[in-house]
């Protein structure tokens, strides 16, 4: 019975491969088997059968409440615990289980109050101290959290929450070695708990041990192959190690397991974009912004892909969305106007520029480009500004707009000349440079095909 009480809310372990069939065991042992197998409903049924031969005492009623919580029947759990509390108002374990219930229902203040009552009644209650540490981490107070976790470990050196909480505290303090050590102790305590390996992998990766981190994530995936974030974490490490195909496979697995997790699509989209798989990258970026419209990092590359594939209207829409999130990046407004010109929608270009011009410094290159896009026939001021510009990267960005408008006017040779110049001089991470490289590659390929 004591084993049941200490284990039914512990992190899940893989069931023993030679476990007898649950139904062939006595009721209390049968319940334990069902818990280990992750079947709380059957465990509750076993509990009801056990009551027929053993009256419900305090321990079994606490167990009943915990089983109800595992099964998601929180209202029934609260009723059971409330009845127990009325009978035993200073029972630390009953108060602790109520704190667990408050945590499950998202009532952090009530949870904290109950946990504080528990440790005042029982200073050696490791789970309560660890719970207070976890709440302190949630308040971004790692110093207070570390104190609570140390109290928990003084009472129980194997407390998993406290060990992993200590690792998190060390990680936030950029003590990678300390974080690795604490996570390692958690692994020693529960070697079948996958997230201890995830935490140690994070610490190892932070201190540059990619090999060790990959080994840990492989172990975590072997223990729990259904958790998408482990594949995402490993995929990120593969990118660091320039192992793009393996990273792509992991991100693909992540989105298959967790189609609601936007990060898998985001990382895969970047790889597909780099590999020139434009349509697939667009599809992934679209999933990202549909899942997380506030993830503004996705809008610029998505807009650039639409631009490169000639979908001018969608490019304009996405560039304008990017501009709303990054108001200081004036290029997005200029590119939205340029996309409107390429779509032969001069009216939309003018509306975009007239709204944006008052926000542009008059001595900036962006202001000069905006004036040119308002009146494309008057290109001499921009050309003159570009010729005088000493910063080669800025000059390249200005030339991009001249090149694109030349393409729109059918002046392919002039456009190609400017695009070649940009490819050699542009800032590699500037969006105009990336667009120019794609445009120049497309023109070159088209020229070769026509010869």
Image (cartoon, rainbow, N blue to C red):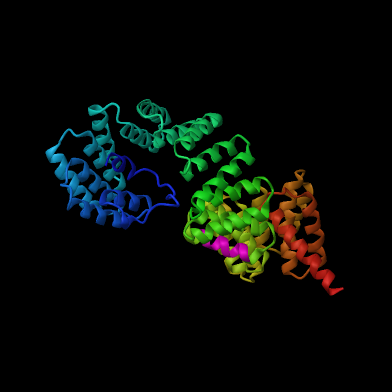
Residue at image position (27%, 46%) is 66
Query: Which residue occupies the foreground of this view, 372 or 397?
Result: 397
Query: Which residue occupies the foreground of this view, 25 or 313?
Result: 25
Image quadrant in which you'd find residue 6: top left
As drawn, 284 above or below 88: below
Residue at image position (30%, 57%) is 42
Image quadrant in which you'd find residue 251: bottom right
As drawn, 164 above or below 21: above
| Residue 395: percent from left, percent from top | 75, 49
> How many discs mark residues in the rendered view?
0
Q: In this view, does 335 lie to the left or right of 117?
A: right
| Residue 115: percent from left, percent from top | 27, 34
Residue 283 forms part of the magenta stretch: yes
Residue 319 forms part of the magenta stretch: no
As drawn, 50 above or below 281: above
Main SS of the magenta part reads helix
Q: In which quadrant is the C terminus drawn?
A: bottom right
Q: Quick check: can you spot residue 199? A: yes
Q: In which quadrant is the N terminus drawn?
A: top left
Residue at image position (74%, 69%) is 409
Q: Is residue 17 left or right of residue 265?
A: left
From this viewpoint, which residue is outermost toward the left? 87
Magenta residues (range): 280-289
| Residue 61: percent from left, percent from top | 20, 45
């Amino acid at each position: 019975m004591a084993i049941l009480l200490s284990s039914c809310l512990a992190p899940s372990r893989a069931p023993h491969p030679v476990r007898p069939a649950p139904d062939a065991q006595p009721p209390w042992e049968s319940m334990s088997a069902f818990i280990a197998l992750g079947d709380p409903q059957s465990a509750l049924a076993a509990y009801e059968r056990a009551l027929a031969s053993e009256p419900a005492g305090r321990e079994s009623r606490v167990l009943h409440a915990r089983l109800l919580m595992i099964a998601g029947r929180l209202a029934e759990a609260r009723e059971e615990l409330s009845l127990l509390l009325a009978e035993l108002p200073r029972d630390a374990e009953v108060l602790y289980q109520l704190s667990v219930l408050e945590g499950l229902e998202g009532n952090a203040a009530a949870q904290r109050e109950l946990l504080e009552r528990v440790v005042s009644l029982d200073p050696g209650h490791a789970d309560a101290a660890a719970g207070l540490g976890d709440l302190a981490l949630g308040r971004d107070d790692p110093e207070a959290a570390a104190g609570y976790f140390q109290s928990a470990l003084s009472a129980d050196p194997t407390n998993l929450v406290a060990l992993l909480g200590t690792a998190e505290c060390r990680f936030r303090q950029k003590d990678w070695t300390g974080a690795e050590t604490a996570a390692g102790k958690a692994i020693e305590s529960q070697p079948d708990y996958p997230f201890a390996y995830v935490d140690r992998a994070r610490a190892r990766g932070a201190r540059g041990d990619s090999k060790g981190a990959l080994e840990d994530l492989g172990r975590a995936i072997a223990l729990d192959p259904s958790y998408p974030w482990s594949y995402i974490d490993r995929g990120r490490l593969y990118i660091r190690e320039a192992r793009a195909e393996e990273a792509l496979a992991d991100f693909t697995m992540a989105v298959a397991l967790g189609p609601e997790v936007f990060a898998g699509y985001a990382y895969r989209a970047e790889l597909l974009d780099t590999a020139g798989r434009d349509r697939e990258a667009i599809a992934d970026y679209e999933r990202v912004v549909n899942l997380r419209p506030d993830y503004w990092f996705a809008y610029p590359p998505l807009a650039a892909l639409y631009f490169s594939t000639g979908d001018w209207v969608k490019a304009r829409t996405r560039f304008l969305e990017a501009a709303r999130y990054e108001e200081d990046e004036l290029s997005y407004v200029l590119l939205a106007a340029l996309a409107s010109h390429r779509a032969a929608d001069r009216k939309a270009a003018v509306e975009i520029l007239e709204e944006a011009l008052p926000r542009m410094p008059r001595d900036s290159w962006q202001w000069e480009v905006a004036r040119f896009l308002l009146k494309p026939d008057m290109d001499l001021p921009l050309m003159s500004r570009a010729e005088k510009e000493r910063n080669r990267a800025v000059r390249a960005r200005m030339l991009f707009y001249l090149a694109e408008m030349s393409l729109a006017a059918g002046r392919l040779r002039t456009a190609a000349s400017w695009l070649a110049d940009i490819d050699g001089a542009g800032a590699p991470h500037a969006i105009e440079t990336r667009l120019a490289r794609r445009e120049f590659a497309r023109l070159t390929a088209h020229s070769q095909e026509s010869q």
